[in-house]
Image (cartoon, rainbow, N blue to C red):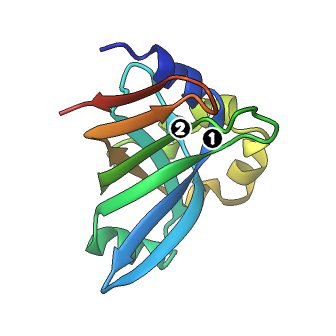
Amino acid sequence: MDLALLKQVAQTTNKIALSTAVNSEADVKIVNFVWYADQPDTLYFSSVKTSPALKVYDQNPDIAFITIPNDGTPGNPYLRAQHVKLQRSTKTMDELLPQYLKTIPNYQQVWDAIGSTLVVFELKLSTLFVDAGVGGEKQTLQFD
């Protein structure tokens, strides 16, 4: 599988708009995420242990998302997926912290303020639409 376009677009973003729905009530949250090229079918994000969002995640693990390009990124590149399986991760924030610090500017401040209260989730992808932006290449990746 050629992951060159995915790697290119993944470098332009560190946020997703995460869409959930429970009892016909849609909701969208913007969360930071990290991704590893050697595990291309999984994105990781965290949430505060006491957040009401955790109940929503547990009730309906079928979600959709679209990435949000970093400020100043030309062409509006993005990653988008539907029917993504959201699950609690066996990874810890301590394990993911180096990638968060590398990927997300000023994440150390977040970590210092609420790091001990974060729980990790993973998004398991089966299909991912990759768009390099206006006039750029487009690709659909199948992981299952």
1 to the left or right of 97: left
Residue 118 drawn above or below residue 128: below
| Residue at screen point 57% across, 28% down | 132
Quarter of the N terminus within the rendering: top left
Residue 88 shows in the view: no
Residue 119 drawn above or below residue 99: below
Q: Residue furthest front?
A: 135
Q: Residues within 10 Å of mark 2 (few under 14, many from 20)?
A: many
Q: Quadrant of residue 21?
A: bottom left
User: Which residue is the site of mark 1?
Assistant: 14
133 to the left or right of 55: right
Q: Residue furthest left?
A: 144
Circle 1 sits in a helix, a strand or a loop, which is it? strand
What is the x, y in percent for residue 47? 52, 61
102 to the left or right of 131: right
What is the x, y in percent for residue 71? 79, 42
| Residue at screen point 67% across, 39% down | 76
Q: CA distance from mark 1 to mark 2?
A: 7 Å
Residue 31 drawn above or below residue 19: above
| Residue at screen point 57% across, 20% down | 8
Q: Give the mark nearest the N terminus, 1 or 2.
A: 1
Say what amino acid the circle numbered 1 marks: Asn
Quarter of the C terminus within the rendering: top left
- Mark 1 and mark 2 residues within 8 Å of each other at the beta carbon: yes
User: Which residue is the site of mark 2?
Assistant: 34
Q: Quadrant of residue 92?
A: top left
Q: Which mark is residue 29?
A: none
